Image: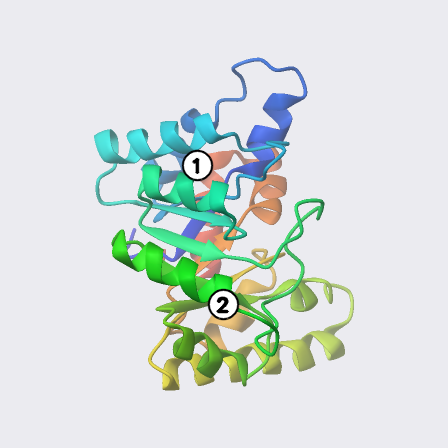
Amino acid sequence: MSSVSRLSVNVNAVAMLRNRRNLPWPSVTGLAAIAMEAGAKGITVHPRPDERHIRKTDVHDLAELIEDRFPNKELCLEGYPSPDFLDLVEAARPDQVLFVPDDPDQTTSDHGWRFDRDISDLEAAIAKAKDWAVTVSLFCDPDPTAPAEAARLGAERIEIYTGPYGACHDDPGRAAKELDKIVATAEAARAAGLGVNAGHDLTVGNIPALIARAPFIREMSIGHGFTADALIHGFAESVTRFRKAMGEV
């Protein structure tokens, strides 16, 4: 197995299942450890204000787990740059923060930043995170004009929203068009000097076409599709399956 990995496992769904009974299982840290032991590059979580899945305590537990047992792995926190979220980033000091333009009531992140709107709060949040030595990524729609705006604000990476591509699982023609948009955005980001991440509704079925067109993508954050796969194959085996889809194993 290659030592290089793009896979960051999002464990939000593990926390959501745990919270149904408010018991210690399934263990967020336990399954995160299995994923990293199996070869994932790190863990992503999106702690929402209502703590409907990941809780603030989970963030601190994961940060401690990585510091103590997996110092070569990474923790990514995803969230809207509210004062409470920024306090959590400052306390946990993840390797990376992904700022998303989510309303607190959204089910999941479903669009990138609208850079033509007021972004003064976003600029301030980016500056704070960089002061804390946290790598900053911005969630962007598959739009080739977005990376230049992200770079102008001071971001170091973007994460391209791949939901529209993932939604085309039964429509190859539309999937090809959505893939073209993602690749064009990824190439624009690379030209702007940004690192390129991708995430949302990625699966072992649709990753190979993406990575073949954009092999320079450095991270894929995968939660729902990974968890669905792991319910059949197990966490460790699903890490291998996704890494095979990425051409890493």
Give the vertical position of 20 relative to 202 (above or below).
above
Please state which of the two labelled residues, at mark 2 or mark 1, is closer to the viewer: 2
Observer-nearest of 189 and 86: 86
Q: Look at 52% across and 33% down and name the residue there.
A: 234
Q: Amino acid at mark 2?
A: Ser
**Residue of label 1:** 236
Q: Position of residue 16 (x, y in %)?
A: 62, 30
Check disc 1 and report its element: helix, strand or loop.
Answer: helix
In the figure, is residue 181 to the left or right of 40?
right
Residue 21, numbered circle: none
Visible in this render: residue 31?
no
Check disc 2 and report its element: helix, strand or loop.
Answer: helix
Q: Look at 41% across and 62% down and name the residue there.
A: 124
Q: For residue 175, what is the image quadrant?
A: bottom right
Q: For residue 195, what is the image quadrant?
A: bottom left
- Alpha-carbon span between mark 2 and mark 1: 42 Å
Q: Position of residue 142 (x, y in %)?
A: 59, 75
Give the vertical position of 236 relative to 108 (above or below).
above
Residue 120, numbered circle: 2
